[in-house]
Amino acid sequence: MEQELYKKIYSVKEGYHSLHKGLRTAKYLSKAKRNGLLSNHFIERIMLSVTEVNGCQVCSYAHTKIALEQGMSREEIKLMLSGTAENIPEAEMPAILFAQHYADTRGNPTEASWGRIVDIYGQEKAMGILAAIRMIMIGNVFGIPLSGLRTRLKGKPSGKTTLVYELSMILSFPFLFPAALLHGVVGKIGQKPVIEFSYNG
């Protein structure tokens, strides 16, 4: 089974929110890696699972390369990118399922699902998992229009994105990034929660 591409198309507004959320939590990924809470393979499985849900072509290519260099097998990578849960270590499965849920809800997971991750892994590791998810979400949200533009320039448009959409997303990034960064700083100063919920479940 091959990976389905362009499964989710995100707006500029969603791109901004993905940047804001990712930048707020980036430090937790570094901390979790530094403290030995998240292995490189675990992080790549999280990122591949999110990329499978969103269907980002450039992210699939980039993270396949990274995963291979880190020693993951082609078969495991192929299974993950096709949405198959085989060969995922049992201890990592809750995090993988949460990552898929996060992407499937377009970055708006339920409070109950997040609470379960904290209960299973503890606060510090859970924050590292959330950070990994949010970093790849940024890549996917902006990588999908980039993928669309790349294939268009090769004379093979995806049929799922328009040129106007692709350019608007790509050209908005340099303006959204500093605004999202400032938003994150203000949120930190104001002690705003790192993760908020629009609904329960």
Image: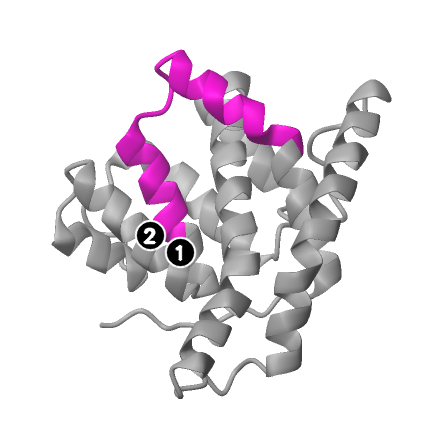
194 w.r.t. 8: above or below: above
State the image coordinates of residue 66 (x, y, percent, origin top left): 27, 43
Q: Residue furthest right?
A: 190
- Residue 41 is a magenta residue: yes
Residue shown at the point (22%, 53%) measured from the top left = 77
Q: Position of residue 85 (x, y in %)?
A: 27, 53
Q: Residue 109, percent across and down? A: 62, 47
Which corner quadrant holds the N terminus? bottom left
Labelled disc at residue 179: none
Residue 5 position, x and y percent, is 40, 72
Relative horizontal placement of residue 184, taking residue 104 as reference (left or right): right
Tell me the number on the disc at residue 62: 2
Q: What residue did someone put label 1 on? A: 59
Circle 1 packing at 10 Å, graded few (<14), some (14-19), many (20+), is many
Which span is picked out in magenta? Answer: 24-49
Amino acid type, residue under disc 2 in the picture: Ala
Circles 2, 1 touching at the beta carbon (< 8 Å): yes
User: Is residue 133 located in the magenta-colored stretch of the structure?
Assistant: no
Give the side of residue 71 with respect to residue 179, left or right.
Answer: left
Amino acid carrying label 1: it is: Cys
**Vertical order, 34 against 85 (above or below):** above
Q: Residue at x 60, y 83 (%)?
A: 162
Query: Which of the two residues, 200 or 121, is positioned nearer the viewer here?
Result: 121
Which structural element holds mark 1? helix
Is residue 165 depicted above or below 82 in this figure?
below
Q: Main secondary structure of the magenta part?
A: helix
* Point 56% across, 49% down: residue: 138
Left or right, residue 157 beside residue 177: left
Residue 55 shows in the view:
yes
Visible residue check, residue 52: no
